[in-house]
């Protein structure tokens, strides 16, 4: 697949999808017009190899470029990882050994190649060029940027203002990252919005070292399943690439409806036109759980396989703990007959399809196996118009029931 | 000569003479009590090899340590000189070639060994340890100090406040200088007062690298011959080590009397007791020009030889340009007889010893060879009580004449 397969407009549309910022779009267009495979760089820190969907937003964007015929450089920042935080102040950055880095890189690759084409992706380590760099070269590199420019970086300016110490080597790390762009002759660098400063550093340094400056493209930080905070392990609002199909299914179906559009835009490989159709259907009344299921199945197929995708909804049930609700809870609305003021629980169990017949319903009530909103009820329990409850009959039958 | 020759008190007295600051005196005493030759470091920038007396204040202090039996490390900072100012903003710091540095170092040594004992002085180049330093080592070094600490350095804080750009590599240079102390395992580092920050950097870094911290000793910046500004070539208020004996003599005798004590303290190797005697004599009315001549002769002997010192006052006259005044201008006070209101120029020339007799005086006036304050005068010129003028009779006879 070469770039010639796509028009400039088609390329631009795919690249722009779900990006936060392109610096600058004009430069990007000029680069695309060169009509040669562009060198696309994205850097990864080999310290946290367990990827979640939040990380894949960036990898998906690499996939877009790869599909368009460009060259992907998947850069492992092993050089600084081996140095760690030499000031010893940041205990979360212990120096890594070569073995740890190699192991992490392998784990990384395994996950990333579920999205990217392994054959077309170049995995590079920045120690390749930095191991040979002398202290004099580093001084030279450090001369290319000013202290005040560096203090403009958001986290540095905050720390400086609050008198939280910044070690001088921390000023060197953005320069190291920027130098990677020079070593790779990057045409484009991708990163999260929190990387904007560092990406621009590469853009500036390339100019100083006589190279054409890279285009910087940032992708947004994906919200976690809570719909509010950034997806992260520590907040336990994440879907890991390593998650089992049932877990993935269950987690994705639990997300708030407000996230559906964003998750599709950033995580699905369906064309935006198809996604717009789904969104329109949802607006028109289609059950959001069904829409989520479509996404869940696409992602499970990507990270596992088609079989796992087809069966995930079953295994999702199996992972429920006692009393825990399934995420793909059927929703049922029951209507009162004219003149009827309430529905008794046996009627509800039957009409909602939670039991086969009235006898089975009565039997279950006798065994104290029916819960309404988590509380055991007996045969005398009834619902009136307007009420919505979650009803559990036995171990496996659930429904969210509304009396219309 | 070993340290055992001197008592602790004798050593301290000599070391303290003319120093600005000792950080700390307590540590210095502890080091001296080790009763071994201490490793004394002083760093020199090989970019400006022409030394003047201002530079020798520091070298004289090294001489004191050398006389006390300690080991002098005369450090040439060739590493950073070879890098220059890579940001290209400081055009006064072009990178030097190995050849230039070697030539400058030789010129340096020539001058310095007029003060220090060549056999007992170790000339070292910091490229010895820095050429092998990797970029990773430099990052490690940079991690040992914080941005805010570095911004406390006087020139950095001023530039930061006034938004004058500071390149990041400028933060690395004090660390490089500090690392030199580690490489040399320096016990003491000497520098000008403008070097205090950098000397303390070495003291701190040694501690971080597990060494005992060096003592930092600063010497004052010597005023130039104008008695006000720092001695410097650009202000043309200097005495260069390379200056010819006559020039040296002439320049030193031109200094204001207020400088005499400081110049003796910092530049003479006479014991302070002897100097105090001279100062007392001057207070008691001895002509300050005579005291200056003593210092001039000591310095000319040091930088040239005893013969040159003895004859410098003659050659001083020879270097005068037409109409230029000699610096050791004789001062003469003439008194009016009772009832006398003025003195005619023939009388003045005779009485001041500028001519042999009245005939010679008249002859000179006829030849228009007599100038008063630079203006030709004739036989009708006279002075009244209270006037002071400089009178020149012919090419070589001068006097500053006051009518009492």
Image (cartoon, coloured by chain):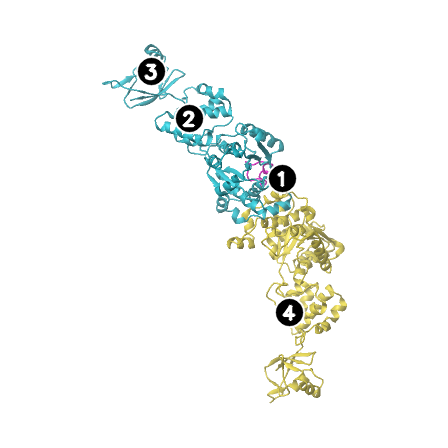
Chain colours: A cyan, B yellow
User: Mark 4 packing: few (<14 Cα in 10 Å), some, or many (20+)?
Assistant: some
Residue A241 appears in the picture as rendered: yes
Q: How far apart are marks 3 and 2 (CA)?
A: 27 Å
Q: Left or right: B114 with respect to A111?
A: right
Q: Mark 3 points at which residue?
A: A349
Q: Is mark 2 on a helix, strand or loop?
A: helix
Q: Left or right: B314 with respect to A25?
A: right
Hey, which residue is sitting farthest left in the picture?
A339
Q: Distance between the residues labelled 1 and 2?
A: 45 Å
Pick whichever of labels 3 and 1 is earlier in the sequence.
1
Numbered range of the magenta stretch: A79-94
Residue A104 appears in the picture as rendered: no
Chain holding disc 3: A
Residue A333, disc: none
Q: Which secondary structure type mostly characterizes the magenta part of the structure?
A: loop
Chain holding disc 4: B
Q: Name the residue under label 2.
A: A292
Q: Left or right: B171 with respect to B272?
A: left
Is residue B337 positioned above or below A172 on the image? Answer: below
Q: Name the residue under label 1.
A: A129
User: Mark 2 packing: few (<14 Cα in 10 Å), some, or many (20+)?
Assistant: many
Pick whichever of labels 3 and 2 is earlier in the sequence.
2
Q: How far apart are marks 3 and 1 (CA)?
A: 69 Å
Query: Looking at the image, which is closer to me, A332 or B174?
Result: A332
State the image coordinates of residue B62 (x, y, percent, origin top left): 69, 56
**Within the magenta stretch, is there residue B234?**
no
């Amino acid at each position: 697949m070469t770039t010639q397969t796509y028009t400039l407009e088609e390329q631009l549309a795919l690249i722009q999808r779900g990006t936060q910022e392109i610096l600058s779009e004009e430069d990007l267009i000029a680069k695309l017009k060169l009509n040669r495979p562009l060198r696309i760089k994205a850097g990864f820190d080999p310290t946290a190899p367990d990827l979640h969907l939040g990380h894949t937003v960036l990898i998906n964007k690499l996939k877009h470029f790869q599909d368009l015929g460009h060259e992907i450089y998947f850069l492992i920042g092993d050089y600084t990882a081996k140095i760690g935080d030499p000031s010893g102040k940041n205990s979360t950055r212990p120096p890594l050994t070569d073995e740890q880095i190699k192991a992490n890189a392998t784990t990384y690759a395994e996950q990333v190649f579920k999205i990217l084409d392994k054959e077309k992706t170049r995995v590079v380590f920045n120690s390749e060029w930095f191991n040979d760099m002398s202290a004099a070269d580093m001084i030279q590199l450090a001369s290319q940027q000013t202290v005040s420019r560096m203090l403009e970086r958001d986290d540095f300016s905050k720390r400086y203002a609050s008198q939280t110490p910044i070690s001088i080597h921390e000023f060197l790390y953005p320069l190291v990252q920027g130098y990677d762009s020079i070593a790779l002759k990057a045409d484009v660098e991708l990163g999260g919005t929190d990387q904007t400063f560092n990406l621009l550093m590469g853009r500036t340094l390339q100019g100083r070292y006589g190279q054409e400056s890279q285009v910087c493209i940032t992708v947004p930080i994906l919200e976690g399943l809570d719909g509010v905070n950034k997806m992260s392990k520590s907040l336990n609002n994440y879907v890991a690439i390593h998650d089992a199909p049932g877990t993935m299914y269950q987690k994705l179906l639990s997300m708030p409806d407000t996230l559906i559009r964003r998750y599709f835009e950033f995580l699905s490989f369906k064309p935006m036109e198809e996604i717009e159709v789904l969104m329109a259907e949802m607006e028109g009344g289609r059950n959001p759980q069904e829409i989520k299921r479509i996404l869940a199945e696409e992602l499970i197929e990507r990270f596992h396989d088609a079989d796992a995708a087809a069966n995930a909804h079953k295994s999702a049930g199996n992972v429920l703990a006692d009393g825990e609700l399934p995420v793909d809870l059927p929703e049922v609305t029951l209507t009162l007959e004219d003149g009827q003021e309430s529905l008794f629980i046996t009627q509800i169990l039957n009409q909602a399809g939670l039991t086969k017949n009235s006898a089975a319903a009565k039997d279950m009530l006798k065994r104290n196996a029916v819960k309404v909103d988590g509380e055991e009820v007996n045969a005398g329990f009834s619902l009136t118009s307007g009420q919505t409850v979650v009803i559990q009959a036995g171990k496996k039958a659930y429904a969210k029931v509304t009396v219309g």
